[in-house]
Image (cartoon, coloured by chain):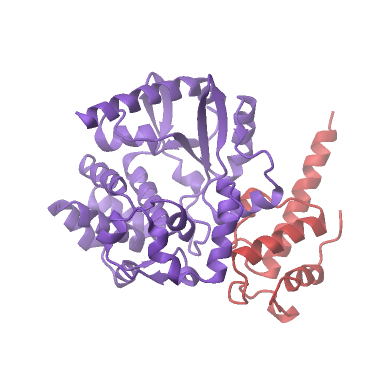
Chain colours: A purple, B red
């Protein structure tokens, strides 16, 4: 009953959001991009609308197309969330994050947020980056609340989701400021896989992960999904992706070697915790704290 | 537009706290020479100010500018892009 009530609320908010987006989507037709997470993921993972809570629209676009899309957003009445956003802030965001500061538009007292994502890795990533233009080369069209949108096919939605979750679970800034390890993250991964076993076959996912050089991160997220969902098919995937490098990541956090620290508590404690910062604060260096403070100022508008 | 030289880039990199990169290390990975994400931002901001240009979004990554020589290439590209857009804007 409660779940159905939440879904009804999500449906009402989703309809409003997509109705407002229809003109923007027409104006951006010529550009290569995809709407990710949110409603498209609800449909791909749960096969129906309204199954995921979201309060923004995430768009994945290449860095080369970023400025053009920003111009279209501005022409459609969207503004950067902070008016005093400096060139230095933009450089910080583009070098340290996968997304720009949100764009916002107020309609009848309701705020619509759009996040422009230009990477599926994190800023600190030192390996081979995935070419976003190539990644977006086979987007699919989906109708959401009567609006046609471009999104990722299930296998790329899975790759995107896995890297997104790995980043959330390991980012010092996110661990310090929000509950970035949540049950619903693993639920999305589990149902996206279970409801798309042909499109995300073990063979296809493995081949693509080898190509993108992300085997350890896929293992990491699948492993913890397996800690939440006991499932024989999932276990096959986990074992296929198991490597010493992936195993070495399991009990640590931090997005690069310099920032990597060891967890002092088990996974269940992390998953249940509403105050992840309390679990990591003893291990943070002054440099870590400085970087978290810059992130807070730029992304959250909080100066300490 | 100011002239982009390796010497000036080195001067800017070495103006950041604890950085000491020599002329012989222009191809070396700056990460290994002590640059972290915060120092990188300080360097990029100073480079843009010094050479009066804007580095394109797709190059604003430590992996794209992780050596002095790569910085030189990116800055030359940024300046040439900037010149091209100035010419295009003048084109009737």
Q: Report the residue at 43% width, 27% height from top.
A: A149
Q: Position of residue A95 (x, y in %)?
A: 59, 56
Q: Report the residue at 45% width, 25% height from top.
A: A17
Report which quarter residue A27 is drawn in: top right
Q: Most extreme residue toward the left, as rendered? A: A232
Q: Position of residue A287 (x, y in %)?
A: 57, 69
Closer-to-camera residue (B89/A253) = A253
Report which quarter residue A103 is drawn in: top right
Q: Position of residue A58 (x, y in %)?
A: 46, 38
Location of the C terminus of chain A (image quadrant): bottom right
Report which quarter residue A144 is drawn in: top left
Task: Answer yes or no: is residue A29 visible.
Answer: yes
Tell me: A163 left or right of B5. Answer: left
Tell me: B85 left or right of A62. Answer: right
Task: Answer yes or no: is residue A199 visible.
Answer: no
Q: Report the residue at 38% width, 64% height from top.
A: A279
Location of the N terminus of chain A (image quadrant): top left
Q: Position of residue A188 (x, y in %)?
A: 29, 43
Closer-to-camera residue (A277/A53) = A277
Tell me: A282 left or right of B31. Answer: left
Can you say whether A20 is above or below A86 in the image?
A: above
């Amino acid at each position: 009953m409660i779940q159905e009530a939440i879904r009804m609320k999500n449906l009402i908010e989703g309809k409003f959001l997509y109705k407002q987006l229809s003109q923007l989507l027409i104006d951006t037709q010529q550009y290569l991009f995809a709407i990710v997470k949110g409603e498209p993921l609800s449909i791909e993972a749960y096969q129906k609308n309204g199954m995921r809570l979201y309060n923004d629209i995430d768009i994945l676009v290449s860095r080369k197309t970023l400025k053009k899309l920003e111009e279209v957003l501005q022409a459609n009445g969207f503004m950067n969330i902070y008016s005093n956003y400096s060139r230095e802030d933009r450089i910080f965001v583009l070098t340290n994050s996968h997304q720009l500061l949100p764009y916002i538009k107020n309609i009848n007292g309701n705020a619509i947020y759009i996040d422009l994502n230009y990477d599926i890795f994190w800023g600190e990533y030192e390996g081979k980056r995935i070419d976003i233009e190539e990644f977006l080369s086979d987007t699919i069209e989906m109708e959401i609340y009567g609006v046609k949108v471009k999104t990722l096919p299930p296998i790329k939605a899975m790759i995107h989701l896995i890297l997104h979750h790995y980043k959330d679970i390991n980012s010092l800034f996110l661990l310090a400021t929000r509950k970035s390890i949540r049950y619903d993250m693993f639920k999305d991964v589990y149902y996206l896989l279970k409801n798309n076993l042909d499109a995300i076959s073990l063979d296809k996912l493995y081949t693509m992960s080898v190509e993108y050089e992300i085997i350890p991160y896929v293992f990491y997220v699948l492993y913890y999904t397996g800690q939440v969902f006991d499932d024989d098919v999932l276990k096959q995937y986990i074992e296929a992706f198991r490597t010493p490098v992936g195993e070495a990541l399991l009990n640590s956090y931090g997005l690069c070697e310099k920032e990597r620290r060891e967890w002092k508590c088990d996974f269940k404690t992390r998953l249940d915790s509403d105050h992840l910062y309390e679990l990591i604060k003893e291990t943070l260096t002054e440099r870590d704290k400085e970087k978290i403070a810059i992130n807070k100022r730029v992304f959250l508008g909080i100066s300490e | 537009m100011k002239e982009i030289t390796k010497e000036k880039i080195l001067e800017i990199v070495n103006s950041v706290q604890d950085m000491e990169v020599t002329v012989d290390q222009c191809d070396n990975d700056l990460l290994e020479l002590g640059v972290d994400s915060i120092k990188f931002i300080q360097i990029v901001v100073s480079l843009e100010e010094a050479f009066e240009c804007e580095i394109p979004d797709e190059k604003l990554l430590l992996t794209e500018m992780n050596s002095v020589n790569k910085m030189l290439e990116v800055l030359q590209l940024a300046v040439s892009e900037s010149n091209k857009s100035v010419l295009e804007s003048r084109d009737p």
